[in-house]
Structure formats: structure tokens, C-alpha cells
Image (tube, grey):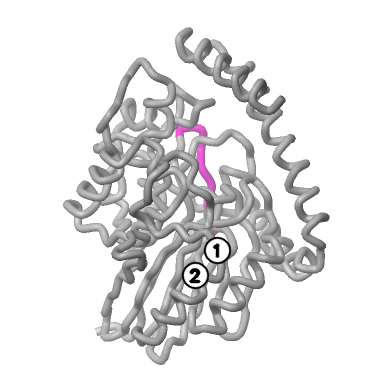
Amino acid sequence: MKDTVVFNAVGDIWFADHPVTLGHGVASTLKKNGPNSFFRNIKNVLDSADLNFCNLESVISNKGLNQKELTSIEMRGCPDAIKALQDANFNVVNIANNHIMQHGMGAFLDTVSILNSSGSHIVGLDHDNFTNVVPFVVNGIKISVAGFSLHPELYYNGTVPYSFRAEPSDVIEEIKHIRNHTDGFLIVSLHWGEEHFEYPSKKQIDLAHQLVDHGVNVILGHHPHVIQGIEEYNGALIAYSLGNFLFDLWQPATKKSIVLKLIISKSNKFDFEIIPVYSSQKYIIHAAEGETKKILLEKIAVLNSNINKLSKLSEKEYDSLVKENRMANRISGYKYFILNLHRYKLSIILQSILRTVRRRMGDL
């Protein structure tokens, strides 16, 4: 029997079409090429692990689907997507995020049912206002995984069934309780931070440090869609954002990611390896090699070294940088849409333009 556990962690996976990639996004590619096309070139890395973790950012359900409505077809995966997760051995799946309720309770519950039927271990479900802690004993080593979303829920008005926490203090108190009732290695998934921004905020850094101080061994961050730095703190590891693993965003930074390989031994000791990966035009995930690998690792090293520098920024300075980044990203989306008009159905173009006009009028 081995005396270690290999736990691979990746960032955001979704099987949907983004509003700006409708007709040529991940969902459309799955229908064309099948569910097993995405991970075939990275399968050797995933197969070498005992546990593979991902953040599932979209439902995989046709419940409530209206093929004529933009809001119904965008950001929605189909049930066949479960075959991709199974084939790649993603057996630990976080669903505490800001898109999992986008298509309502029916699609959410159907997604949970599909995951359960496949044998997946679901992280981030709430039970009686307390997150489910998923325990594992592998090779005699105890590992527990919990997940929270700190991003506001924008799509569902009722009480959400996943582990959304409005305040960081709520997560801290829950982690205290979990650690008091759980021994072994504790991994916490956090859906947090700013989209398309390469640096965590001081508030995130402070929260991460407090969670480690209360017994968390590894923090796995996601939501920004780009890689952020990885920090070693007080014997623990904080990956502020693992980036996109499978996504259909168009910016170059969103196509580069990592597999964070944890080698966990007894007494809560661990080593780790960063495996850089990238996504091709057909959303096929590849392990980076040669010069591409070198450039990605150098980029990650810069992000790591800048964590402490960014923590010294005032909240006002950080927010100003985020605002600039949001505007640049919005302009990027408009440019992509215009340059790819020939790829959309006329009904999608009209609905997209109308929605944009309504949003801009709402901002006035």
C-alpha cells in the first residue's frame, strides 16, 4: 500500500457556451466532437492521482431549457458532459459558485442528481445552513474537503442550496467548527476574488491567513478565470486562483492554467508540484512543454512574488485597478462579438444587442 495520496486540483470547468461564444463555445464543441475530446491529452496526469478536484461552474442539465431564449441556452451544459468528468476521473466536484443556480432550482437539482449517479463526491452543498464536509480515507490517510462561495448570488432570489457565505467571518467560524470535529488533512475550496484580475485583494489574503491559522492545510481558489499567485504560509498552501481549466473565454490569459498536484502523507505533511497547462482553440487541454512551460512557470513565479506587494495597496487603490481591468474586459468582449458576428444566429445577435442596450440604459 502506498504511504501517500496524490490529490490533483484544477480551477474552473464548465460545459456551457459563454454568451459571446454561443454556437462555438464548449457546449457546442461537445455536441460536435463528443464529451471525451477535452481532456484526452491531459488524461495521463489525471489518471496518476487518487483524487481529482474541479470547480464545476455550469449546470449540466436540460431542465427548463428553451432553445429560442438566449438566457436559457447560454451558460448551460448538457447531461452528456458527465461523461467528460468521468473519463478524466474528476471525482471531487465543487458546486459552490455563482453560476450553478443560473438556470433555476430544477436544473441545479438535476445536476446534483447526475453527479451523484456518476459517483462524484460533491463539495459545497449546504445542509441545515452548514456546508457538507466530504471525508476520504485513502491509503490510511484522512483528507476532508469543504467548499464555500463568497461571490454574491445574482440569479436566484430564494435561499440557495449551495454554501454561499456573505461574510468572511462566517467562513472563519464554520472552519473553526469543522476543524474541531475533523482530524486529518483539510482542503477548502473558495469561490472568490475579482474576475480577470491577476492579484488577490488584501481582504482575501487576510481571510486566507486566518483560515490557515484555524487549521486549513490547503486553500483552492477560483472565480477570477486567470491564474493568481500561490503562497506558502505557516506550513499551508494558498492557491488564490487556479484559473480556467476548461472554459471558452477568448482572452489569452484565460486559456492558461495549472494542475496543482498535492502529494499528501501522514501527519498532515505534503509536497506539491505545479503542472502548467493550456487550452487549444478546440478547448483541448494540453500539458505545457518546452518554452511554453518555462514562460508559464516564470509568470507564476512573478505572481507569487507580487502577493505581498499587492497586500500593501489600500482598498481604494486596489478597487481602482479592478475597475480599469473590468472596463478593458468589457471592451474586449464587444470587440470579440463584432469580429465574430458571422458565427452567430441572427436571433442571438438581436437578443444580445437588445440586452446590452437595456443594461446600458439601466446604468444611466
In x, y percent, where is residue 248?
50, 35
In x, y percent, where is residue 142?
32, 82
Quadrant housing residue 331: top right
Residue behind mark 1:
167
Q: Quadrant of the N terminus?
A: bottom left
Q: Residues within 10 Å of mark 1 (few under 14, many from 20)?
A: few
Three-letter amino acid code of the residue under disc 1: Glu
Q: Which residues are magenta?
A: 276-282
Q: Nearer the viewer, residue 48 or 96?
A: 96
For mark 1, give the secondary structure: loop
Q: Quadrant of the C terminus?
A: top right
Q: Nearer the viewer, residue 239 or 360?
A: 360
Residue behind mark 2:
171
In x, y percent, where is residue 354?
56, 14
How many numbered circles are shown?
2
For mark 2, give the secondary structure: helix
Three-letter amino acid code of the residue under disc 2: Val
User: Visible in this render: residue 268?
Assistant: yes
**Residue at (61% x, 55% y) in the render:** 193
- How far apart are the two marked residues, 2 and 1, measured between alpha carbons? 7 Å
Q: Nearer the viewer, residue 8 or 126?
A: 126
